[in-house]
Amino acid sequence: MSRPQNDVFLRALLRQPTEYTPIWMMRQAGRYLPEYRETRARAGSFLSLCKTPELACEVTLQPLERFPLDAAILFSDILTVPDAMGLGLYFAEGEGPRFQRPLRDEAAIRALPVPDPQQELRYVMDAVRTIRAALHDRVPLIGFCGSPWTLACYMVEGGSGAASDYRTIKTLAYSRPELLHHILDTTARALIAYLNAQIESGAQAVMIFDSWGGVLSASAFREFSQAYLRQVVAGLVKERDGERIPAIVFTKGGGLWLDALADTGADALGIDWTIDIARARAQVGDRVALQGNLDPAILFGSHDAIEREARAVLDGFGANPGHVFNLGHGISQHTPIDAVEVLVRTVHEHSREARA
Amino acid sequence: MSRPQNDVFLRALLRQPTEYTPIWMMRQAGRYLPEYRETRARAGSFLSLCKTPELACEVTLQPLERFPLDAAILFSDILTVPDAMGLGLYFAEGEGPRFQRPLRDEAAIRALPVPDPQQELRYVMDAVRTIRAALHDRVPLIGFCGSPWTLACYMVEGGSGAASDYRTIKTLAYSRPELLHHILDTTARALIAYLNAQIESGAQAVMIFDSWGGVLSASAFREFSQAYLRQVVAGLVKERDGERIPAIVFTKGGGLWLDALADTGADALGIDWTIDIARARAQVGDRVALQGNLDPAILFGSHDAIEREARAVLDGFGANPGHVFNLGHGISQHTPIDAVEVLVRTVHEHSREARA
């Protein structure tokens, strides 16, 4: 394994000086790209796209061919882990992800296994190796997983909990908290093994997506999400072949809890667009780098608005080291390609000028 | 008009000392009550329930018969105002509210009228008068409206914007902001007339629901929501018959913006459960009262958990004047009745003891 030619992203995560602010976009390999839609159609289904390393590699690289992005991210899904834990992931047409066997009774919860990532999740490790080979060390590859709390939401609700206001899992949290803690601890152990296997296979940074942490109260967030984010980060391999492997934690809607998030031990925090980045930076100081935080809907605006808002994020963070530009959430499938071109160009040019 | 026998709610909003912490619940007249479902069935539809003053009065009073709540809230809907502005509100079965004529072109936006609340919204004023008479000054009656931004979301998206990530209105915000400002200013003027008419008809406090403010970036929130919340509050009648009419502003997901919200001129801020109430109190100091902030999902937990979490909210706010207990969002239709009994009893008893 060697250092990527473009290591600006890795240096920014470790708060080292960079010549410009690196940018990548959550869900950058996705439906807004016609070439993605073509590969996805060829794969037959989203899941077979995830489970076929050559196709996962193909879509991972597509956005890099179009835009000078500073990182690639493994094409996969956070729900591969509960699937490997035996819950039976499937995608109902137009309904999002579902599980055939959601966690609904104590016996199933107590029997929850920690999968071997080299067995049940071997296809992910094959994808990581295939992508690393195809990248030729151009930019770093990010591995990822969901957070224990976010995966538990899907596992207990049986799909996205948004429609039910997370009623099933919150009922568990406020009536049988010890059972929820068992799910969260088991999942955290599964995720440590999973991310470390991704690192062993070639991932050069890792990100933990706590997509649903923001639905909790402040105290419940500490008890049911932050504690397990910290457990996962603590269990990660910190270095491979002499290179630091930075860890990013992203709690969507976690702007109020940046102190608790910085205390997870992560090198960087993802932030969504509801928090002013200057305020976030003032709050976390030099403890962690920040990744974010443009509202992805701004990419539907005029090119002038995209440039203005991107510059405002860069200027808000300021000339300090430790900023990775990103959207505050995954890019929308409806995003025009030329908006992404304007964004990437603005971030690179404006941040170079600001340093000059 | 005379002072209600139980004026604890009004005094708490004005940060005057009270013997205990008052409680009411957003959506307290709702589907979790069998008697509500019975009246709703009799009305035939949700809209005819809103538009028939006697039935709106009946459901407004139902929760007060069951629980010793400290305020009543007008039974109505925030979308009555855009309906009166000519957009054609209807409720598609299982789909939530929709508009027949969403605002999709400049001509329609420029032609948007400010309705006369005594004409197009007379049924609301009749409901307020009917409820006041039926209440016999037992507890105060709260009038309400949606915020300009939240109503504009519905008016531009044509229904709830959540499914589309507010793409249509955000595209407008970032490509034709002057058109969005026109919608917001027109709606703010309509809301001032509407709330003042409710006050004239007997509402003793008013609340502005900014349900979708939290989907904006920090800077867009100030520009597109906060500025118009401030405009509405500034236009409100502050006193009637020598009694102060307190105004409450509630931005769901607005925990990061409490300073901006306190600057709207509101007497009290509603807060959801994502912010620790002790932190919120420290942030706003003596500028405003606070209303909140139990996660409504806690009502699905054990009675022990309900008592513990309710006490934590009360203790978090502390012994200062200026707290109205509430949920952080509307009560769920699936809530067990006995959970509400436990909550109301705990809030009253624990807050009395804490003062003793």
Image (cartoon, coloured by chain):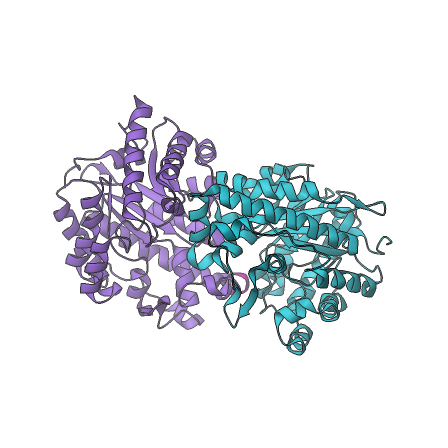
Chain colours: A purple, B cyan
Write down the region rendered in magenta.
Answer: A171-175
Looking at the picture, how far across and down is residue A100, in whole percent? 35, 73
Q: Quadrant of the N terminus of chain A?
A: top left
Q: Is residue B102 above or below residue B62?
A: above
**Residue B32 in view:** no
Looking at the picture, how far across and down is residue B87, in whole percent? 56, 60
In the picture provided, is A275 more to the left or to the right than A341? right
- Observer-nearest of A296 and B326: A296
Q: Main secondary structure of the magenta part?
A: helix
Give yes or no for residue B303 being in the magenta stretch: no
Looking at the picture, how far across and down is residue A151, in whole percent? 38, 59
Q: Is residue B244 above or below residue A304?
A: below
- Observer-nearest of B82 and A159: B82
- Observer-nearest of A68 and B161: B161
| Displayed quadrant of residue A8 | top left
Q: Is residue A171 above or below residue A292?
A: below
Residue lying farthest to the top in this orientation: A356
| Displayed quadrant of residue B328 | bottom right
Looking at the picture, how far across and down is residue B315, in whole percent? 66, 47
In the picture provided, is B144 more to the left or to the right than A349? right
**Residue B105 in view:** yes
Residue lying farthest to the right in this orientation: B2
Q: Is residue A162 above or below residue A285?
A: below
Question: Which residue corresponds to the image point at 81% horizontal and 63% vertical from the top-left?
Answer: B135
| Displayed quadrant of residue B266 | top right
Q: Quadrant of the C terminus of chain A?
A: top left
Count of marks, rendered view: 0
